[in-house]
Amino acid sequence: MNEFLEKEEAVLRMLKTVFDPEIPVNIYDLGLIYKVDLDEQGGCHIDMTLTAPNCPAADFLVEDVRQKVGSVEGITAVDVQIVFEPEWTKDMMSEEAKLELGFL
């Protein structure tokens, strides 16, 4: 596997360690991560959403993403953008998340 793919895989693994404090499922499996782009200089741009626009954990989640993704070897900067298009729905969750939360 090439270095770029390894770095991308490490970022995705790290995103799976970020949990909304009110939901026992990681933000990746919840479907809150819309886009992850890596650049040649080690920058990582992430578009993510929230389960609700007024989510009280928004600042915590963004900071947790920045710190954890920033700890990945080769990542030099992390830019997290909160987006609300498309609107998040339960259909965006992984099968594992739906099972964990009792939606299956």
Image (tube, helix red, strand yellow):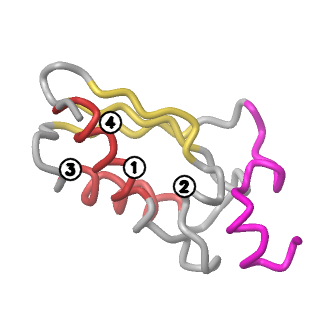
Residue 96 is one of the magenta-drawn residues: yes
- Contact (Cβ within 8 Å) of mark 2 with mark 4: no
Q: Position of residue 77 (x, y in %)?
A: 18, 37
Amino acid beneath label 4? Asp
Q: Are marks 4 and 3 in contact (CB under 8 Å)?
A: no
Q: Give the residue at x 88% y 71%.
A: 104
Mark 2 falls on what kind of element? Answer: loop
| Sequence-first disc among 3 and 1 | 1
Q: Which residue is mark 1?
A: 12
Mark 4 → mark 3, Cα distance in angstroms? 10 Å
- Residue placed farthest to the top in the image? 40
- CB atoms at circles 2 and 3 under 8 Å apart? no
Rounded to the nearest angstrom, the CA distance separating label 3 from label 1 is: 12 Å
Q: Residue visible at 11% across and 48% down?
A: 73
Location of residue 92 in the rendering, given as x and y in whole percent from the top left corner: 75, 48
Quarter of the figure with residue 60: bottom left
Q: CA distance from mark 2 to mark 4?
A: 17 Å
**Label annotation for residue 28:** 2
Mark 1 vs 4, N-terminal side: 1
Judge depth for marks 1 and 4 and give the one in front.
1
Mark 3 — residue? 70
Disc 2 residue type (three-letter): Tyr
The numbered mark at residue 90 is none
Judge whether 25 appears above or below 82 on screen.
below
Query: Is the Cβ of the residue at disc 1 closer than 8 Å to that at disc 2?
Result: yes
Q: Which residue, given by chain and number where applicable, does mark 4 sit on?
A: 79
